[in-house]
Image (cartoon, grey):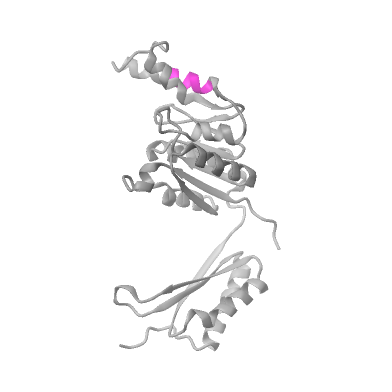
Amino acid sequence: MSAPKARIGLIIVGDEILSGRRQDKHFSKVVELLGARGLQLSWVEILSDDRALLTAALQRSFASGDIVLSCGGIGATPDDHTRQAAAAALNLPLVLHPQAAEQITLRCAETAAKGQGTADMNVPENQQRLQMGMFPQGCEIVPNPFNRIPGFFIHDHTFVPGFPVMAWPMLEWTLDTRYAHLHHQTQLAEHSFVVYTMPESRITPALVALEQKWPDVRAFSLPSVGESGGSPHIELGVKGEPQQAAHALEFLRAEAVRLGARFDPPSV
């Protein structure tokens, strides 16, 4: 069996997602960004803006050794807790990152030049903006091409804002800069077919046998009860190393035929 590949997880932070005030857009985009690079998402968590809950979740993810992308909660208002939770999970102090301070100062100067605010970093509002550069000690910044306010990277965890216009290019930069060596490391194939007039329980032993015979292939079964007026059916498939997946698909088709499956919907 091949060596295990790096697992990639996604953490989405925000009470507004859990309450329904905003709809999450990160999950589908991250799947897209990873897929374009031959990578796959292994897990996702949606968490509230609760510091204790975030700290516990990050303690688990830091201990896992997974690559983790985290969106949301790194601002400097009272409802943002991700920076503090990351520091607590690693038992590290929060410190003003010098590169973050530099970028925030540049941002303040740019907005002042447009007649918005002041470039004086001693005024209260700019001192508050500097709080967004308080990161766990020892981290590296993640550049933000939208407004310069950076995210941070530490122990294979990348933390970016919740705004898609900022988060997505920051995540792309991370994937292409820090994890380029993982891109298209393994070619994967995915095949499926639809069968009718067969209960899922009948084909399940074949799915188990398939994964035992081809350890680098995963089988899947997606049943449908006939929504929108269609006939009940099952989509059966395999995904994994291309050559093994091709052999596994032949096996699964043959088993479906042997067990009496039909490949055309029954006539009404």
Against 225, is 82 above or below? Answer: above
Residue 229 shows in this picture: yes
Q: Give the x, y percent position of residue 245.
A: 59, 69
Q: Give the x, y percent position of residue 125.
A: 37, 17
Magenta segment range?
Answer: 99-106
Q: Is residue 103 magenta?
A: yes
Q: Give the x, y percent position of residue 119.
A: 38, 13
Against 104, is 243 above or below? Answer: below
Q: Main secondary structure of the magenta part?
A: helix
Which of the 4 image quarters holds residue 108? top left
Residue 65 shows in this picture: no
Against 175, is 203 above or below? Answer: below
Residue at horizontal 40%, vertical 21%?
107
Residue at horizontal 45%, vertical 20%?
130
* Tally of numbered tags: 0
Against 50, is 227 above or below? Answer: below
User: On the rendered image, what quadrant is the N terminus found in?
Assistant: bottom right
Q: Is residue 113 left or right of residue 64?
A: left
Q: Give the x, y percent position of residue 93.
A: 59, 26
Q: Nearer the viewer, residue 243 or 118?
A: 118
Residue at horizontal 33%, vertical 88%?
267
Which of the 4 image quarters holds residue 94? top right
Q: Is residue 194 magenta?
A: no
User: On the rendered image, what quadrant is the C terminus found in?
Assistant: bottom left
Q: Nearer the viewer, residue 216 or 9?
A: 9
Q: Is residue 97 left or right of residue 144?
A: right
Residue at horizontal 30%, vertical 18%?
116
Q: Is residue 56 left or right of residue 231?
A: right
